[in-house]
Amino acid sequence: MCGRARCTLAPDAVGAACGFGDCQLRLIDHDRYRPSYNVSPGAYFPVVHYEAKDDGEALPVVQAMKWGLVPSFTKKNEKPDHYRMFNARSETVREKTSFSRLLPAKRCLVSVEGFYEWKKDGSKKQPYYIHFQDERPLVFACLYDSWQDAEGDTLFTFTILTTRVSKRLEWLHDRMPVILASDDATKAWLELGCSLDDVFRKFVQPYEGPNLVKEEYGILLHRQWASRPLMGQIVSRRSNNKR
């Protein structure tokens, strides 16, 4: 499961994080995105996907989309619920209509610095921050959709694929995001011509690399989240990457 993340990347840096090197991708609605150390479903993220042109060519773009999938078949007068589908289980994503119809042409990438998970300790929950040791961004496999409300406004939203947790983090939770840690993985997920069977077998798997580490945050930090963003203030933090 992934329900909180840190995303302070500049929109024009997201393409490089997702494997496009120095190529400057076109930005769409980037003014809606607000970098934050504490992001939850319902917030805008810079999302990389291929946009089809009238001539049939598809080009990569970075588009601001809200986290928490709202399927296109949602009723126009219904209030969007971004917490209902902010994650999608990779093991069943090809079986559920809400997700399976998006796999052929609406795969996308989301890049963040890290994500948060909690460990229950009696009546308390201890927050941990999961990230790469060298602090390079994580890239998640995602799906997106568009929905039109009663006023005719179009909303783009996405969901993050999850998988069973890695052996190194199974003490913390039973799920984790699908992390695409190489250019081959990000390219395969975005390239619409790739075999989905091959992509899932090779890349939609738990990330087992030793460079994915955790930091333990103070309980006070956890309590602050309900009322205001973190704004980068760490109340208490301990690194312990041996576990």
Image (spheres, grey):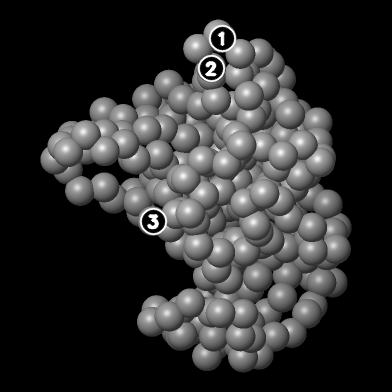
Say whether marks 1 and 2 touch (CB < 8 Å): yes
* Mark identifier at residue 56: 1
Q: Residue at x 60, y 61 (%)?
A: 7
Vertical order, 67 against 182 (above or below): below
Say whether marks 3 and 1 touch (CB < 8 Å): no
> Closest to the observer: 7 or 1?
7
Mark 2, residue position: 53
> Closest to the observer: 61 or 234?
61
Three-letter amino acid code at disc 2? Lys
Q: Earlier in the sequence, mark 3 or mark 2?
A: 3
Give the total number of marks visible in the rendering. Answer: 3
Residue 95 visible here: no
From the top left corner, tell me how far across and down residue 141 is, in percent.
Answer: 61, 39
From the top left corner, tell me how far across and down residue 59 is, in percent.
Answer: 63, 24
Mark 3, residue position: 42
Determine crowd level at label 3: few under 14, some 14-19, many 20+ residues with C-alpha closer than 10 A: some
